[in-house]
Image (cartoon, rainbow, N blue to C red):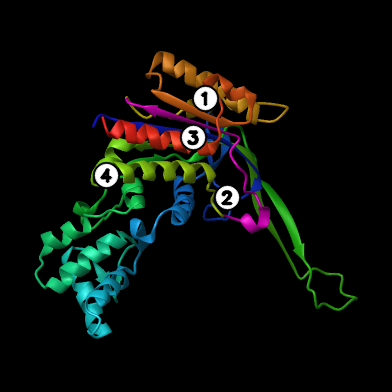
Amino acid sequence: MSNLYVDLHVIQTVPPSCLNRDDTGSPKTAVYGGVRRARVSSQAWKHAMREMFKKYFDEQDLGVRTKKIVELVAKEIKILKPLVEDSEISELAEKIINKANVKTADGEAKALFFMSIQQAKNLAELAVSDEFDKKTAQDALNKGHGIDIALFGRMVADDPSLNADASAQVAHAISTHKVDNEFDYFTAADDRAPEDNAGAGMIGTVEYNSSTLYRYATVAVHELFGQLANDSDATAKAVVEFVRAFVLSMPSGKMNTFANRTPPDAVYIVIRNDMPVNLAGAFETPVRSGSGYVGASLKALGGYAENVYGSFALKPEKSYVVTANNEFNALGNAISLDVLLENIEADIKGALLL
């Protein structure tokens, strides 16, 4: 099939929060356009998306990122050989995994490994056949990629032949404006302290910021289609759930402290045939506003998108907008998220059938 991309653009305001911390506990930031911006890493948001996938996909359709892959394969071997001792099954599982050139130590992979349940079954079936070599073991590991492996890819440093190319990309979210981190000084009382003790049982600080974020992701549908064995229904569902999860998920960092879960202020999704187009350039000049950043950010994004379409990229084949803000109507008539997902599914299935 020809190239087909689904680009997702989200403007989302987040109140005081610490969604994604660095090694010192500070909210992650980045300098863009000469000023400090709030930042949430793509890894943090992809993890949140994978957690949401568990609600909408069967476990069999997903992957597990873990060092405990010997346990995964052993579990499937036990189903096939229930009367064999557990120790022997574990040895057999580790043997087939090592044959595929995935290194283990003390019954675990030496590094995190992304394996689908189907791939664990593939290895188990091959292991009990007692007829396998490196090629057949690696073939088993390269068939039946889970939805999340097909979307986000798999990297195996020891043997690149086991890599899986990602069909989706997720950008680091950045604020559309300059951000300064702040500190919350807190105290906690000891509930059983003597009445004449006025001191705190604990004191500390939490660093946080608040921001209006620009978030971007893209799915190469033609690549995903190949990763999922040219199954149009599975591909359409994968794209729909990717869109749902990208729009509605949120990293859980310090969520109990700040209760900062917010819905997006606007979602702009386009279907393209030429190339993915990240519109972060709309905010290279940081948004400045004395009356909030959402409206000004939406206006900047809409104007920049129209300029890009007129100068460097083709106008999208289709575009959809979900928002309650009138500043964004220039890019399309607003619809609900449920209608958007229905339209995306129909669009993908229609394109894959051509």
Identify the element where label 1 is drawn.
helix
> Mark 3 or mark 1: which is in front?
3
Q: Earlier in the sequence, mark 1 or mark 2?
A: 2
Task: Kindly identify which residue carries mark 1.
Answer: 282
Q: Observer-nearest residue: 232 or 39?
A: 232
Report the mark closest to the observer, 2 or 4.
4
The amino acid sitting under disc 2 is Leu
Looking at marks 2 and 4 on the same chain, the residue that comes earlier in the sequence is marked by 2
Q: Quadrant of residue 24?
A: bottom right
**Where residue 322 sits in the image (x, y, percent)?**
55, 32
The answer to whether 191 appears left or right of 182 in the picture is right
The residue at which mark 4 appears reads as: 231
In the rendered image, which residue does mark 3 sit on? Answer: 340
Find the distance from the CA under tag 2 to the CA under tag 3: 27 Å
**Res 7 label:** none
Magenta residues span 253-273
